[in-house]
Amino acid sequence: MGSNKGRTVLEVGADGIAVITIVHPPVNSLSFDVLNSLKDNCEEAMRRNDVKAVVITGAKGKFSGGFDISAFGEIQGGKVEPPKPGYISIDIISNTLEGGKKPAVAAIDGLALGGGLEIAMACIARVSTSTAQLGLPELQLGIIPGFGGTQRLPRLVGLTKALEMMLMSKPVKGQEAHALGLVDVIVSPNELVNTARCLALDIVERRRPWVPSLYRTDKIEPLGEAKEILNFARAQARKQAPNLKHPQVCIDAIEEGIVSGPVAGLLKEAESFQTLLHDDTCKGLLNIFFAQRATSKVPGITDRRLTPRKIKKVAILGGGLMGSGIATALILSNYPVILKEVNENFLQSGIGRVKANLQSRVKKGKMTQEKFEKTFSLLKGSLGYESFKDVDMVIEAVIENVSLKQQIFADLEKHCPPHCILASNTSTIDLDLIGEKTRSQDRIVGAHFFSPAHVMPLLEIVRTKKTSPQVLVDLLDIGKNIKKTPVVVGNCTGFAVNRMFFPYSQAAILLVEHGTDVYKIDRAVSKFGMPMGPFRMIDLVGFGVAIATGTQFVLNFPERSYKSMLIPIMQEDKRSGETTRKGFYAYDNKRKASPDPEIAKYIEKARSMSDAKVDPKLMKSSDKDIIEMIFFPVVNEACRVLHEGIAVKASDLDIAAVMGMGFPPYRGGIMFWADSLGSKYICSRLEEWTKMYGDFFKPSAYLAERAAKGAKLSAPMMDQAVSRL
């Protein structure tokens, strides 16, 4: 048995109970080695005369976090031979474990997710701690439960709850699992295995029923009613995930078991699982899964064995939308915060915003009133710097104005202790410029949150050439504590996320000036899987922000910016987006957007100013053409960001695109998606458009070089990138 790939251990007690323990740190994941060892030990227990029953548990307070996900990549890449369909779910779990001649009881603590829960459900009974987490989150990876979960969960908790747990990847805690009938007994962790032993003996001696989960029918609705529930779930899944087929496949497998019996259901599940594993959606979601875990590894920084310092108090400058959102995120994770504003009015508004953010959590049932009061008490307001003498970190979140930020950083240097981290939440301005007038450049860093800051999952950590590794380690730790995914990037205009996506809205405007309909573009982009189209997004962030950030890019990348007066002339006419109820769309008092025919005159005017010619071909663009013309320039810029070493690795850009800009995760991130189309194809399309519409589309040197070799864009650039930083 490969020790590094985990195993199970069998111990037989004097009471005749064989305890089989899953051992594969850190979460006892189910590698092929663990599963084969489980089969061997189950068979041995069933054979031995001194064994009456079996208890299955996990080492060190964790039952099992599920199937070993790294094995999926190995199967997809053809590195390992997959087991024949149904070998695990039928041969090991149904026949050897559930169908064995001695009953098994699961003793669950910590995690019982995915395959872990599927093994537990194949036992005759389940004992759990109240805090254990039980769930089938496989759909998050583009697959379906593959070890019998689609058949057993509905039989244990009923169809409606089983569908919710699978389709929404929603785990339940032990207490709720008990109420649902998924767990038979709740006990404290130190009584767990003993209670399971007693329960197993009760089953052997028929003091408790011995009914395999697979054949239970008491929780399944009559056929007609069951079909209605399944059809409703299908319609919901289609509405929520129109581009995804695996939720429908999951419902098909459940239905097969209800209509044709559980064995037919298991076979259908096994075949579907194999097919989905090789689907693009699964490959894309797996890429995001591993990319997210890799963001916290930064070569040359996280391998220095530095320990994060304890951050006891944080100050925030600016209580606007961003500042109040950042303050909310910090106090929610128990960081005391001082919010500084320039006058009492602004300060009260900022504090009011934080309060409203927390109150909305209370209203949604995510927070108790008592917790609200405790959390809100961590926030203090301030108009001066006197309370800054003992802060460990300051985050500046004022408007995007260079001289104002320079002044603030010079003041901070005077008023904060010498170890204090000086961070800016700027989204576009070069940090070297911001810290130009200070002597503390080693502690200046970008902490770029995305709006709304207490909701959006990404934190872009920006380092200059002088930022100390300690400061980066500290910020990575804070990112983790406030439940953000941190991405460490280099310093330049727009950093990684905004810089990579600046061509997104510019390409959309270029298309409109050359004849494509605004609303057709937004529809195509939403259909592709973005939360909204580029024009609806400009309305949402507001024209002021769009002009301020756009100006930075035009100044810094003039040769590849598309210059248009469309947004400025609309703004002159008091159309500034959603807040003024008029932008590219008109908004009613419930903020519902509808197309506005009035924008045609602004487009006409902008077109004459930039001398753009209407191209009949672009008037009839297909959705595919629109997507390529909008996203290929983004890919092109992402290539520059990678090549310049602004991003350490392509997978960081994939995460940045998904978590910062809403790029659909099932497409695997921007670079992964680009590689699925091929560098040659992308480059040839960009060359074609460069001839027709100018240098905005011109392929970058890196893209052209990869295309010439037919190579992947997301090739490991580590050595080059690190040597540049």
Image (spheres, grey):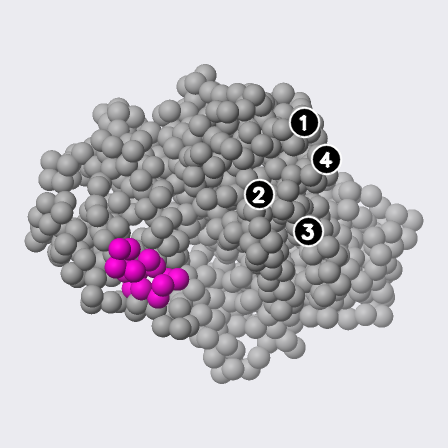
Mark 1 and mark 2 in contact (Cβ < 8 Å)?
Answer: no
Circle 4 residue? 390
Query: Mark 2 or 1 closer to N-term?
Result: 2
Between the C-alphas of marks 2 and 4, the distance is 15 Å
Examine the rendering and report whether any part of residue 114 can be seen. no
Q: Secondary structure at mark 4?
A: loop
User: Which image quadrant is residue 365 in?
Assistant: bottom right
Q: What residue sits 48% from the left and 62% below the top?
A: 250
Examine the rendering and report whether any part of residue 711 can be seen. yes
- Residue 379 is tagged as 3
Between the C-alphas of marks 1 and 3, the distance is 22 Å
Circle 2 residue? 317
Query: Mark 4 or 3 closer to N-term?
Result: 3
Tell me where residue 232 appears, x and y as whole percent. 46, 75
Q: Residues within 10 Å of mark 1 (few under 14, many from 20)?
A: few
Kind of residue indicated by mark 4: Asp
How many numbered dots are placed on residues in this image? 4
Viewer-nearest of discs 3 and 2: 2
Kind of residue indicated by mark 1: His
Between the C-alphas of marks 2 and 1, the distance is 18 Å
Q: Secondary structure at mark 1?
A: loop
Q: What residue sits 85% from the left and 65% below the top?
A: 202
Q: Which span of residues is magenta-colored?
A: 571-585
- The quadrant of the picture occupied by the N terminus is top right
Q: What residue sits 49% from the left and 35% below the top?
A: 405
Kind of residue indicated by mark 3: Leu
Query: Mark 3 or 2 closer to N-term?
Result: 2
Q: Residues within 10 Å of mark 2 (few under 14, many from 20)?
A: many
Tell me where residue 506 appears, x and y as whole percent. 26, 45
Query: Please, is residue 174 above or below residue 313 in the view?
Result: below
- Residue 419 is tagged as 1
